[in-house]
Amino acid sequence: MVIQQLSEEECKSILADASFGQLGCSADDQPYVIPIYFAYEAEHLYVFSTPGQKIEWMRKNPKVCVQVTKIENEIAWVSVIVIGSYQELREPQYTDERTHARKLLEKHVHWWQTALAERQSKSEDELIQPLLFRIHVNTLTGLRAGDK
């Protein structure tokens, strides 16, 4: 197996094609990793969510990372790591950005499922207040593994 570093352009291309990854955040010296659906465009990952632990933690500590992995088999895979910062897109200050984020997210089939399914399983009768946030990409790194 040969492992090669990806260029920044290759990392951006992989993010543009992807819609699912793992979000890492931390608070009070405790890490937390969860699956997210996202849309990537122009140095931002856009995410639909509901209030919960990850939002509380990212409000405390906006430093986050996202890993996107595509696996063909045990020796053929690609992985991109985004190091960035959390920004909640609140109304009315970010109305235009929220509209743009929804348009990007709606291009993906399951963009809303993770957030709503998790919240509905915990509280069937509660009104769910969705929110949108973005992660500003500070750095991108990536690796590709293969047999050549």
Image (cartoon, rainbow, N blue to C red):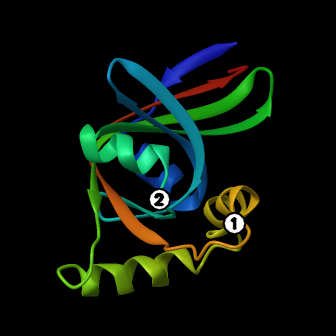
Q: Which residue lies furthest to the top in this view?
A: 1
x 27%, y 86%: residue: 95
Residues at marks 1 and 2 touching, judged by CB atoms closer than 8 Å: no
x 40%, y 69%: residue: 132
Confirm whether residue 138 shows in the render: no
* Horizontal side, residue 51 vs residue 64: left or right: right
x 33%, y 44%: residue: 58
* Horizontal side, residue 35 vs residue 6: left or right: right
Q: Work out whether residue 60 or residue 125 is closer to the camera in this orientation and state it.
A: 125
Q: How many marks?
A: 2
* Horizontal side, residue 84 vs residue 93: left or right: right
Q: Quadrant of the C terminus?
A: top right
Tell me the residue that label 2 is attached to.
51
Residue 51 x/y as whole percent: 47, 59
x 76%, y 20%: residue: 75
Decide: is 44 above or below 102: above
Q: In which quarter of the image is residue 83?
A: top left
Tell me the residue that label 1 is attached to.
113
Q: What residue type is labelled 2?
A: Pro
Residue 60 x/y as whole percent: 26, 40
Q: What residue type is labelled 1?
A: Gln
Of circles 1 and 2, which is in front? Answer: 2
Q: Is mark 2 on a helix, strand or loop?
A: loop
Decide: is 82 above or below 116: above
